[in-house]
Each structure stands twice: as structure tokens, then as C-alpha cells.
Amino acid sequence: MKLSGNTIFITGGGSGIGRGLAEALHKLGNQVIISGRRKGHLGEVTKANPGMQSVELNVEDPASIAAVATKLIAEHPKLNVLINNAGIMQIDDAASTIDEGLLVSTITTNLMGPIRMTSALIEHLKKQDAATVINVSSVLGFVPLAMTAVYSSTKAAIHSYTQSLRYKLKDSSVKVLELAPPWVQTDLLNSNDEPRAMPLAQFIDETIKVLGTDTEEVLVEGAKTLRNNPGPGEAALVIQFNDTMEQPPH
């Protein structure tokens, strides 16, 4: 992917990986528009990065997605990169009753949100000389974390959807990438100070380097073992991984 001269829209850009990507891409000479539900977070990011813009968006709400897409196309006709990053992660228990609110909000945000956002912008993106859709999945889409079964399932579904989208757009000007992060120090599961997670700054630096290549899957080194697990015998690593994650950090 070309790393400069783009007009980029990032969902969930007010914190964590979304903010990290937004700031890195802003510094590289792109027009970046971030979105999220929390107006205060958006204002904090844009104030710290003069020239960056923001728009409030609730990715659980189809009407909000439609309104923001219309606004983006009108105000940023050169928009050529969509990064579907917004997501929520909550602990559940697949061996017990799963809270209906958790189930619906997670699937609506993590899976239906990116599909709806892409659908709302895809005809515009296809008109650009070169465009990119980046879907942020997770290594947990390949090796699920049992304590976040619903979240992990949505990320597996995003991987599947991304492959279909890529195939359908293969003869267009739109490239489709998947960014599958490992465990990163962010607000998700209160992991900001988690020693087993990858520091956010390091993750962003490595990700930008990989993003600048021709790869369709954007993977930092720390993500590759889990990404490459699916296949015959995959259960062994799933069990080992979950046994490890149930232990407290040393």
C-alpha cells in the first residue's frame, strides 16, 4: 500500500490501535479522518494532531453509518482508504449462559459494523484510481481465546468476509487487506500495562513497515505463530494457548 497522499477514514480512531494508526499515517502525509462514539476522545486526538479531522460514529447503528458515509463522500471526494478498526472485547463464558446484550453488541460492532461501513463506501472507493479497504481482525480469529468466545468468533468471521471481499474486488481498483494484531497493550481487557502484550508503539511501527509492502495480510512477527495455526492438529495449540492465558502473568 502507498503510505502517503491518501485520504483515510478510520473507525475507532479515538484510542488504542486506531489512534496509533491514525497518528502514524497522519505523520506520513495523509489526510486522516477518525471516528468513534466518544466526542472527547476524538477531540483529544485531533487537537494533538493538527490537520486531522474527526466525525462521531456509532458503528452499531446503520443510520449513523449511512449518515457518516454520505458526509465523508461529500466532504472528502478523494477518500480512498477505509480502515475498519472499531471493535469491542468482553469476557464471556461459552460454557454458561451468555449475556444477550454482550452477544448482540459484540457481533453488531465487530462484524456487522465493518460489513455495513464497507457497503456504504464501496461504490465510492471503486471510482478511485487506487483504493484500499483494511479490515482489522485478530490472531484470536485463528486461535480463539476461550474466555472471549464471542469476540474471537467475530474476528474469525471478519477473516472469512475479508477473503470474500478481496475475491469480489480482484478486478477493481480496490485492494483488500487484513490486519491481524497479536495481544497489544490497549484498553481492550485493560491491557495497557499487561507485560505479556506487545507495546502499542512497537506494534504500530512494525505494522506501518509491513503495510508499506504488497502483502494482503498485515502481520507483525509476533502474530505469525497464531495466524499460521489453523489446519490439521490445530486443537493442540488452542488448548496450550488457553491454558497459558488462564495463568496469571509472571
Image (spheres, rainbow, N blue to C red):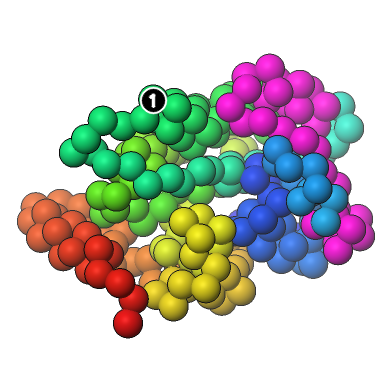
Residue at (18, 64) in percent of width and height? 243
Quadrant, the N terminus: bottom right
Q: What amino acid is at disc 1?
A: Glu
Of residues 164 and 22, the one nearer the viewer is 22
Q: Is residue 188 visible?
A: yes
Horizontal side, residue 69 vs residue 17: left or right:
right
Q: Position of residue 225 (x, y in %)?
A: 28, 67
Horizontal side, residue 184 vs residue 49: left or right:
left
Q: Is residue 209 visible?
A: no
Residue at (37, 47) in percent of width and height? 91
Residue 149 drawn in magenta: no
Horizontal side, residue 239 vs residue 228: left or right:
left
Residue at (38, 38) in percent of width and height? 154
**Bounds of the magenta span?**
45-72
Q: Position of residue 20 (x, y in %)?
A: 66, 63
Q: Position of residue 128 (x, y in %)?
A: 72, 36
Q: Is residue 97 above or below residue 26?
A: above
SS at badge 1 = helix
Q: Is residue 250 above or below residue 22?
A: below
Of residues 166 and 246, the one nearer the viewer is 246
Of residues 98 and 54, the one nearer the viewer is 98
Read off the residue under disc 1.
100
Residue 52 drawn in magenta: yes
Q: Position of residue 220 (x, y in %)?
A: 45, 69
Residue at (46, 56) in percent of width and height? 189
Tell me where residue 175 sits by quadrant: top right
Q: Is residue 67 above or below residue 52?
A: above
Label 1 Cα neighbours within 10 Å, binned few <14 / some 14-19 / many ≥20: few
Quadrant, the C terminus: bottom left
